[in-house]
Image (cartoon, rainbow, N blue to C red):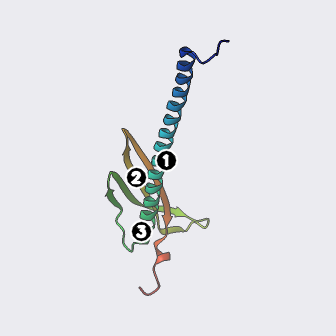
Amino acid sequence: MRTRGFTLLETLLALMVFSMAVVSLVEAVHQLGGTTLLMRREAEVQERMRSLLIEHTRLPDPKDEAQVKEGDVTYTVKRTKLELTNQDGITLNDLFEVRVTAEWLEGSIMQQATAETWVYPPLFHLPGT
């Protein structure tokens, strides 16, 4: 009676299929890690832009333009006076748009993100100050 085992060719074929599966799995985990780092970085930039917006809407006499460099990210804050009129034709004075733009290099690709808000400074001043 002849015992049947795996031939060398069958063993090599099974090993090749297993190796391809392992390489695919490692590549997927690597891409997932890269995506996670990119998302974390973007979340940090978004949080810092939010912080700068709050800071520049609360300053008593902010500059019209400011630039902040933190690591490899450059934040540009611009404050622009808005000229709006209401339904009665009255011009709304002291209304500003504050815009924060972040620029950074991710690998070899330049990334950019923007956040903006409007601010009415008299809301933040106490009477008599």
Residue drawn at the location 41% of the way across and 85% of the way down:
129
- Furthest-bottom residue in view? 128
Residue drawn at the location 50% of the way across and 61% of the way down:
117
Which residue has dot 2 on it? 102
For the residues marked 2 and 3, what is the alpha-carbon distance in whole angstroms? 15 Å
Q: In which quadrant of the rendered view does residue 21 lie? A: top right
Residue 53: x percent and y percent?
A: 44, 63
Which residue has dot 3 on it? 55
* Label 2 residue SS: strand
Which residue has dot 1 on it? 36
Could you say which is closer to the camera, residue 94 or residue 10? 10
Residue 52: x percent and y percent?
A: 41, 63
Could you say which is closer to the camera, residue 23 or residue 81? 23
Q: Residues within 10 Å of mark 2 (few under 14, many from 20)?
A: many
User: Count of labels shown?
Assistant: 3
Q: Is residue 106 above or below residue 18?
A: below
Q: Is residue 18 above or below residue 33?
A: above
Q: Is residue 45 above or below residue 86?
A: above
Tell me which numbered mark, 2 or 1, is placed earlier along the sequence. 1
Q: Is residue 80 above or below residue 113?
A: below
* Label 3 residue SS: helix
Query: As shown in the figure, which amino acid type bears the numbered disc 3?
Result: Glu
* Label 1 residue SS: helix
